[in-house]
Image (cartoon, rainbow, N blue to C red):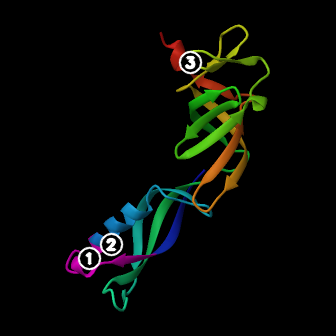
Amino acid sequence: MFFHIVLERNMQLHPRHFGPHLRDKLVSKLIKDVEGTCSGRHGFVVAITGVEDIGKGLIREGTGYVTFPVKYQCVVFRPFKGEILEAVVTMVNKMGFFAEAGPVQIFVSNHLIPDDMEFQSGDVPNYTTSDGSVKIQKESEVRLKIIGTRVDATEIFCIGTIKDDFLGVINDPGAAV
């Protein structure tokens, strides 16, 4: 799920950047440091949409660096239990498959794949139905349901299932021949 939230961060800036473009330097450093990171509390920071406020700088003794409190708006992505996502399969093995939905990696165990699908090893490992009509392999697009999440300080891990109504393969790259 995507959220638009306001966050704060203390930014340190070297004295050589002081001058008429101080604000621009702070904003570009903020974007470089924050976009693409993950905090367990808020999720993955997708994009910074605006800077609300840059506070008064505080000089750090001995170094000359100045610390500015910066309040900014950003879009974050945080998956929740029960959420339906569309993901791209990145790896298939006999234990299940891994898929990515944006920055989140999701594991789907073979116990959470429909019973009529069996693992096929070979050049391209995949899960295939008995009649061969549906195939899950690398680069397949699947719709899955998040059934569990584990949040670390800098990463979010998810477990998913396709063993439910309206879940499964959306697009199979192997079928386009």
Q: Nearer the viewer, mark 3 or mark 1?
A: 3
How far apart are the two marked residues, 3 and 1, measured between alpha carbons?
53 Å
Residue tagged by mark 2? 26
Q: Do tag 1 and tag 2 residues touch (Cβ < 8 Å)?
A: yes
Which percent across, then down, holds residue 13?
32, 77
Q: Nearer the viewer, residue 50 or 98?
A: 98
Q: In the current view of this chain or complex, which residue is farthest to the top?
A: 131
In the displayed structure, would residue 162 be above or below residue 177? Answer: below
SS at circle 3: loop
Which residue is drawn at the image coordinates 34% and 67% (left, top)? 29
**Residue at the spot of label 3:** 124
How far from the left and from the top, in percent, is residue 144?
Answer: 67, 35
Mark with earlier residue (2, 3): 2
Q: Helix or strand or loop: what does disc 1 sit on?
A: helix
**What residue would you read off at disc 1?**
22
* Mark 1 neighbour density, 10 Å: few (under 14) some (14–19) many (20 or more): few
Q: Is residue 158 above or below residue 33?
A: above
| Segment tinted magenta in the rendering | 10-24
Work out whether residue 132 or residue 118 is closer to the camera in this orientation and state it.
Answer: 118
Under mark 2, the amino acid is Leu
Which label is found at residue 106? none
Q: CA distance from mark 1 to mark 2?
A: 6 Å
Whole-percent x, y for residue 16 in the image: 22, 78
Q: Amino acid at mark 3?
A: Val
